[in-house]
Image (spheres, rainbow, N blue to C red):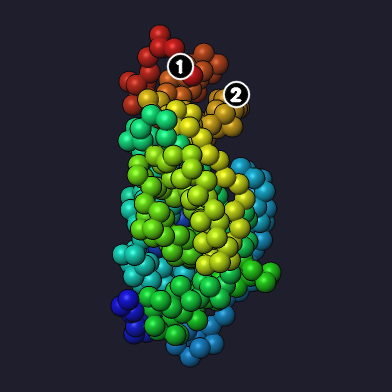
Amino acid sequence: MKRVGNLYESTVSKDSLYQGFLDAKKSKSGRRGCFEFEKKLATELSALNNQLMTGTYKPRPYFKFTIYEPKQRDIYAPAFRDCVVQHAVYAKAMPVFEKTFIEQSFACRVGLGTHKAADYTQQALRRAGQGTYTLQLDIKKFFYSIDRPTLRRLIEKKIKDKKLVNLMMMFAEYQEPTGIPIGNLLSQMYALIYMNPLDHYVKRELQPRAGYCRYVDDFLLFGLTRDEALDYRAKITDFVNNELKLTLSRSTIANTRKGANFCGYRTWRSARFIRKYSLYKSRKAVRNNKLDSFISHLAHASKTRSLQHLLNYAAQENPDLYRQLPKTYHQRHHPKRSNL
């Protein structure tokens, strides 16, 4: 396997850090940290460059907060200056690893995402023959369970520049013996790197006939017999335990005709719907007159049969909000249709 070196100096150069600032600003503009950094941009970039080149750079403490949707999670928000460094690292490291990822790893990658994952799921269900089964599994407390020495070993398989690896691992540090912080840009890349061996094991060794896909720690195998599903579950459990030091939280073996509950959608061969919780949140946005939130829910439902139901609901329950929707939704609205 070819390893890449001599990346550190170009990663922490002033030009790379400036581009990192521009990338970080896209999602952080309007934040106080971004404003203060930009106010003294040349000085801040020079200080970061000096610290990184002399080996004195250390990330600042995270701002920690908790979210409760869809489930409780502790989020660790880095200081803006550390976001700049992470974006600079991401720009250099991600292309190195991107070449190794399978096409069916859909999370946190440009041009992919939940819609593409749901499209693939529906196509795989259609490819699977009558009487076949799906095997769905996910990892127990994935981000909190990542083994950092294993993560470092996987990074070093592709990057031989020790200084860059050391910098990358600074953003994997966590208060517990295992795990990485949720909230870092680089944590998304680390999740892709960490689960990549499983993707190749399933595709090369197990080779499910109708396909395989994964979104972060949730993954599906299609077109199996029931005996194959049981056998593959045992083999994947061993691989996850022994190679990745992780534990499966649940597994579901289901007949293909029952569809799949994956990536925020309930999907069958012929139809796709948003989940009941998303339906509830969409209706709540209508009742509370939250236009931006409702438009976001409509985007999520855009390729599903739930879209017509949501538009009908908005037209009936909150006509003023409905009239403010972009014209494209009015053009797609057919009130006489029976939905959901």
Whether residue 7 is situated above or below residue 23 in the rendered picture: below
Classify mark 1: residues with Cα within 10 Å, few (<14), some (14-19) or many (20+).
few
Q: Quadrant of residue 326?
A: top left
Residue 226 against residue 318 in the figure, above or below: below
Q: Position of residue 334 (x, y in %)?
A: 37, 14
User: Eyeballing the image, is 77 above or below 120?
Assistant: below
Where is residue 322 drawn, in percent x and y? 46, 21
Amino acid on which disc 2 is placed: Arg
Q: Quadrant of the N terminus?
A: bottom left
* Residue at screen point 50% across, 76% down: 152
**Real-space CA distance between mark 2 and mark 1, rounded to the nearest whole angstrom:** 19 Å
Front position in the image: 93 or 159: 159
Q: Mark 2: which secondary structure? A: helix
Indicate the amino acid at tag 1.
Asn
Considering only order in the chain, which callout, 1 or 2, is on the residue closer to the N terminus?
2
Task: Indicate the position of residue 296 as horizontal and vertical percent values.
Answer: 47, 36
Residue bearing mark 2: 287
List the single residue furthest toward the front.
Answer: 227
